[in-house]
Image: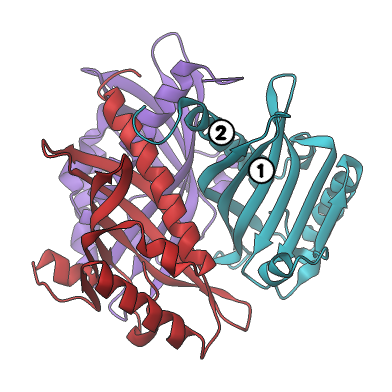
Chain colours: A purple, B red, C cyan
């Protein structure tokens, strides 16, 4: 590996990309139980508008502290979505490692695009935004300590927002 | 490379990503002859709805066994598309190596998004889905033994579906 | 790294991907001053339609020779965009190194998708296209010697085109 990038950061980015792909696969397959397991027990998970995030406001249309809340939220979504069957697909790109902190916390970000397909068969943009992440290792595997999903798109029906 | 990912899987993923980019370039440039050469002689190629795939049904809006059928289909598309000039662009992301089988078959997947731009100049989502792939090596280079394109989007005019 | 890809090309692609992510972050955050610094002093930057590019025509809806022109253009855009607040998000995928020239010029390409979100909160496809790049190293870091943004999407209001 040449130039300004170190081997460690490159290797970490490749590993996080794999993590994000598995994350997307679980959500798109509706395997919310498996999705929840990608978080730490005390994980923070939020979906919020870019305006909020830039203003430093804590509010979010989804706001979870701890895996229990994330799980509750996931099941609520699964039940709601049954009334209007639809499919989601995540495209997660432009992953970047921002910093390696001494306590083994990895700060990273990525862009995400979620497409939604309803019964009419057309795919639309459901949500687009940026993940602001903090990863830690649990038994060698990466787990999310915090995922802050900061979106540009303002969803009309917030009750039907799917995990980003 | 740290943690749970082995060097081999990382290297393979990077190689498949390059393959998928060349695949997209050929399709987007309309170089269908070059595109066909990315498949093995006895390759399987299908485009099918997620419902079909999940139900284990063999049907697909495109169903090809062998390079000859893939080539025939490609030329039919090229001729049809001439009646309504349009451009396509593929975005292939979230590539992942699933398994390395002892017989050198590599199972992998990736997400794809195809945008379509017609004469009015606007870009729309043509198709979004997931590739389920089996790669083999032919003279060291990767070739597709099977590409199953499982889409979420239900296209209205199936006669104009472009290779995914 | 196995097979047909050399370590050098892989390492370069990974480094360019990081570059492109930083490039996208600067544009999406509106940090145009930082964005301009990713170009060489004598850089070429153009946004043009695929028809133009394929016909070998020099015209472009944005055409800049040198960092000064790029900077002027960026500030003009920032001022214009203030009249209709909007957000952009770049997804840059399928990066590929085409060649390593003896004079240290790196030819590469990538696909880009720009989403635009207006005050109504909906995200739309603003522009989709392909970067045709020439990179050089300035003090070890990659810098753009030329970025030719060749788009499929025909924008209606060209005065509001955001840097691709």
Q: Which residue is mark 1?
A: C29
Q: In the image, is residue C137 above or below residue A23?
A: above
The residue closer to the viewer here, B138 or B136, is B138
Q: Is residue B71 above or below residue B15?
A: below
Specify whether C134 is left or right of C114: right
Pointer 1 indicates a residue of which chain? C
Observer-nearest residue: B82 or B99?
Answer: B82
Which quadrant does the C terminus of chain B fall into? bottom left
Q: Which mark is residue C18?
A: 2
Residue A42 placement (x, y as % from top left) = 28, 26
* Residue A156 in view, yes or no: no
Residue C83 in sight: yes
Cα separation between marks 2 and 1 = 16 Å
Looking at the image, which residue is at 72% across and 57% down? C162
Q: Is C156 displayed left or right of C15 in the figure?
A: right
For the point 54% across and 39% down, the residue is A57
């Amino acid at each position: 590996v040449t130039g300004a990038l170190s081997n460690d950061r490159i290797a970490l980015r490749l590993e996080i990309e794999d993590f994000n792909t598995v994350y997307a696969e679980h959500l798109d397959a509706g395997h919310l139980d498996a999705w929840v397991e990608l978080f730490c027990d005390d994980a923070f998970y939020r979906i919020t508008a870019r305006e909020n995030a830039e203003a430093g406001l804590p509010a979010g249309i989804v706001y979870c502290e701890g895996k229990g809340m994330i799980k509750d939220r996931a099941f609520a979504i699964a039940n709601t979505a049954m009334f209007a069957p639809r499919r989601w697909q995540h495209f997660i790109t432009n992953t970047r490692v921002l910093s390696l902190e001494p306590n083994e916390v990895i700060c990273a970000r990525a862009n995400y695009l979620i497409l939604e397909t309803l019964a009419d068969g057309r795919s639309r943009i459901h949500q687009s935004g940026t993940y602001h992440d903090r990863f830690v290792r649990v038994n060698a595997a990466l787990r999310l300590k915090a995922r802050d999903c900061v979106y540009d798109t303002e969803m009309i029906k917030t009750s039907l927002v799917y995990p980003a």
